[in-house]
């Protein structure tokens, strides 16, 4: 069985990015995109309405890290590590199956700059090489073509399409599931 250990926390670097642990000081930055309707367009969760919700989110993320049940990174630009522009994670880890679900989100001001691709590439490497995953999955809104392009760029294939499997805000939504096996 997979036994991840996120202590000490693995800070990851790319050419332009520093992926680091969230702190309570990040609440305002998280709120800036989690309260943004455009940023949340494909995320079936309510918009945040205050800094307390952002702080609670940080506590939940850090809690799953402390118990080794998942891991989330704040996405920052190198040279500006105090400014969180998004987040990425393995927020569901199926330890018995050596499989984890990847997730990512970015403030719209930083879209279409290759930032998510850079972060996802780094998470894939970390997941396979350090966590010893066998496969990585992603659950996305099927209308989110940008997210689908990021996934297929790295070799993810669509494994499933669930019709109306998720109820949110009075409607049933579809889910596309993509997967990548360890090379």
Image (spheres, rainbow, N blue to C red):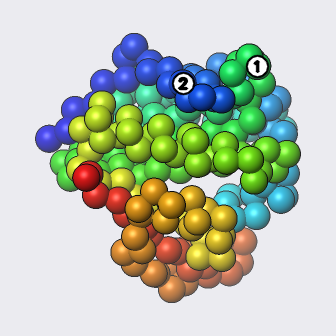
Q: Which residue is drawn at the image coordinates 65% and 71% (left, top)?
A: 145
Classify mark 1: residues with Cα within 10 Å, few (<14), some (14-19) or many (20+).
few
Secondary structure of the residue carrying numbered label 2: strand
- Judging depth in this view, the residue of 118 and 58 nearest the camera is 118
Q: Is residue 170 above or below residue 40?
A: below
Q: Which residue is drawn at the image coordinates 66% and 70% (left, top)?
A: 144
Q: Which residue is drawn at the image coordinates 37% and 16% (left, top)?
A: 7
User: How far apart, in angstroms, are the residues tagged by discs 2 and 1?
Assistant: 13 Å
Residue 30 in picture, x, y percent from top left: 75, 36
Q: How many circles with numbers are drawn on the protein?
A: 2
Q: Which residue is drawn at the image coordinates 36% and 53% (left, top)?
A: 136
- Judging depth in this view, the residue of 77 and 169 nearest the camera is 77
Q: Is residue 94 left or right of residue 78?
A: left
Reading the image, the residue beneath label 2 is: 13
Classify mark 2: residues with Cα within 10 Å, few (<14), some (14-19) or many (20+).
some
Secondary structure of the residue carrying numbered label 1: strand
Tell me whether the residue at label 2 lies in contact with that at label 1, contact meaning CB atoms closer than 8 angstroms.
no
Asked if residue 139 shows in the view, the reply is no
Residue 111 in picture, x, y percent from top left: 77, 51
Q: Earlier in the sequence, mark 2 or mark 1?
A: 2
- Judging depth in this view, the residue of 170 and 173 nearest the camera is 173
Reading the image, the residue beneath label 1 is: 80
Residue 27 in picture, x, y percent from top left: 76, 28
Residue 83 in picture, x, y percent from top left: 77, 24
Q: Quadrant of the N terminus?
A: top left
Quarter of the image for residue 21 reads: top right
Asked if residue 93 shows in the view, the reply is yes
Label of residue 25 in the image: none
């Amino acid at each position: 069985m997979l036994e991840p250990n996120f202590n000490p926390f693995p800070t990851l670097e790319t050419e332009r990015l520093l992926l680091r642990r969230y702190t309570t000081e990040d609440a305002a930055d998280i709120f800036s995109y989690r309260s943004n309707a455009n940023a949340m367009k494909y995320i079936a969760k309510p918009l945040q309405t205050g800094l307390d919700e952002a702080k609670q989110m940080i506590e939940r993320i850090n809690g799953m890290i402390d118990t080794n049940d998942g891991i989330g990174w704040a996405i920052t630009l190198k040279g500006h590590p105090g400014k969180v522009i998004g987040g990425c994670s393995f927020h569901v880890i199926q330890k018995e199956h050596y499989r984890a679900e990847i997730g990512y989100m970015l403030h719209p001001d930083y879209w279409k700059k290759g930032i998510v691709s850079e972060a996802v590439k780094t998470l894939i490497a970390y997941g396979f090489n350090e966590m010893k995953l066998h496969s990585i999955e992603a659950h996305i809104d099927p209308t989110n073509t940008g997210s689908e392009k990021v996934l297929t760029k790295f070799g993810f294939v669509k494994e499933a399409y669930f019709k109306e499997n998720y109820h949110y805000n009075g409607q049933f939504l579809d889910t596309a599931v993509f997967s990548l096996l360890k090379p």
